[in-house]
Image (cartoon, rainbow, N blue to C red):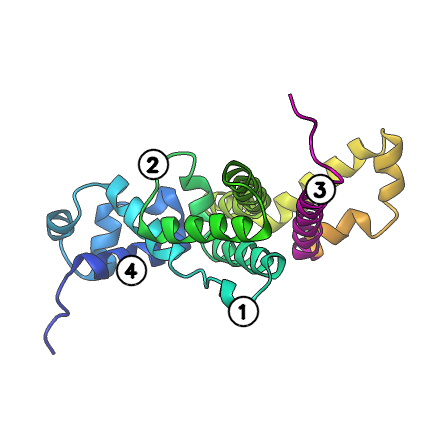
């Protein structure tokens, strides 16, 4: 059976799989070439640098986000779907959260996502500048919300590679954190409630609470009840 032709698209798809499995630290041309059954020099012929590869891979996964149809959806439902789509994508590909801090990332896939974000908040009634601010506020909220889970994935991977029991180390760290929390009254009170475990058990509920609170604030501003005073 003839070997599948090596193309830039095939390389990028394989890079996404490798990034999902190994994270940013696990991506190198040699490992990628091995996964493709090819030589590293052949990969370099199509894509010159690791930075280029991360940029291309990131833009492909932005294309996974299903964009809501503004024609048949009110702005708030569209904003919710838009943010949820980004959050789900970052959950599937946690390495992208880290890549924002180490690579210059932009391409048609992300531009498509950002453009609809502006359209959503213009449709809501924000003027152009405030639509930019609203879209940026939601974007940074979603990105920040994805940071904790992404960091946990990276930490667990690193601990496992060192031969450690990631689960046990995490449990030990939580025990120490509990002892520290007991020194502070409000934290101590929550140790005996579901608040101590709810975020870990159901982080999406925390995400939804924050997102809807943010959109509530936008609605208040749009009705004029919470508009900032003019300078």
Give the class, few, some or many, for how many residues have Cα within 10 Å of label 4's Cα (few <14, many ≥20).
Answer: some
Instruction: List the residue tagged with mark 1.
Output: 72
Instruction: List the residue tagged with mark 2.
Output: 104
Magenta stretch contains residue 175: no
* Image vertical order of residue 183 relative to residue 207, above or below: above
Badge 1 element: helix
Toward the viewer: 19 or 104?
104
Q: Nearer the viewer, mark 2 or mark 4?
A: 2
Image location (x, y in percent) of residue 25: 37, 42
Q: Which residues are magenta?
A: 202-231
Toward the viewer: 190 or 22?
190
Q: Real-space Cα distance between discs 1 and 3?
A: 46 Å
Image location (x, y in percent) of residue 207: 65, 51
Q: Nearer the viewer, mark 1 or mark 4?
A: 1
Q: Real-space Cα distance between discs 4 and 3?
A: 37 Å
Q: Real-space Cα distance between discs 2 and 1?
A: 35 Å
Marks 2 and 3: CB-CB under 8 Å? no
Image location (x, y in percent) of residue 210: 68, 47
Q: Nearer the viewer, mark 4 or mark 3?
A: 4
Label ID, residue 13: 4
Q: Earlier in the sequence, mark 4 or mark 3?
A: 4
Instruction: List the residue tagged with mark 3.
Output: 174
Q: Real-space Cα distance between discs 2 and 3?
A: 35 Å
Residue at horizontal 85%, vertical 29%?
Answer: 183
Q: Is 69 left or right of 25, judged from the image as shown?
A: right
């Amino acid at each position: 059976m003839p070997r599948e032709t090596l193309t830039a698209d095939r390389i990028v798809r394989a890079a996404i799989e490798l990034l999902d499995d190994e994270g940013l630290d696990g991506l190198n041309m040699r490992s990628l070439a091995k996964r493709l059954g090819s030589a590293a020099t052949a990969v370099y012929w199509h894509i010159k640098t690791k930075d280029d590869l991360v940029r291309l891979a990131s833009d492909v996964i932005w294309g996974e986000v299903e964009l809501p149809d503004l024609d048949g959806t009110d702005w708030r439902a569209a904003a919710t779907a838009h943010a949820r789509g980004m959050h789900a994508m970052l959950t599937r590909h946690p390495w992208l959260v880290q890549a924002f801090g180490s690579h210059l990332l932009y391409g048609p896939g992300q531009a498509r996502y950002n453009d609809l974000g502006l359209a959503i908040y213009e449709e809501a009634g924000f003027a152009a500048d405030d639509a930019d601010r609203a879209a940026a506020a939601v974007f940074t909220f979603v990105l920040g919300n994805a940071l904790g889970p992404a960091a946990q994935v990276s930490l667990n991977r690193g601990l496992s590679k060192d031969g450690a029991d990631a689960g046990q180390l995490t449990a030990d760290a939580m025990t120490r954190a509990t002892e520290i929390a007991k020194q502070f009254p409000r934290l101590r009170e929550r140790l005996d409630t579901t608040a101590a475990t709810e975020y870990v058990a159901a982080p999406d509920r925390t995400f939804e609470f924050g997102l809807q609170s943010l959109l509530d604030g936008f609605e208040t501003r749009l009705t004029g009840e919470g508009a900032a005073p003019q300078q």
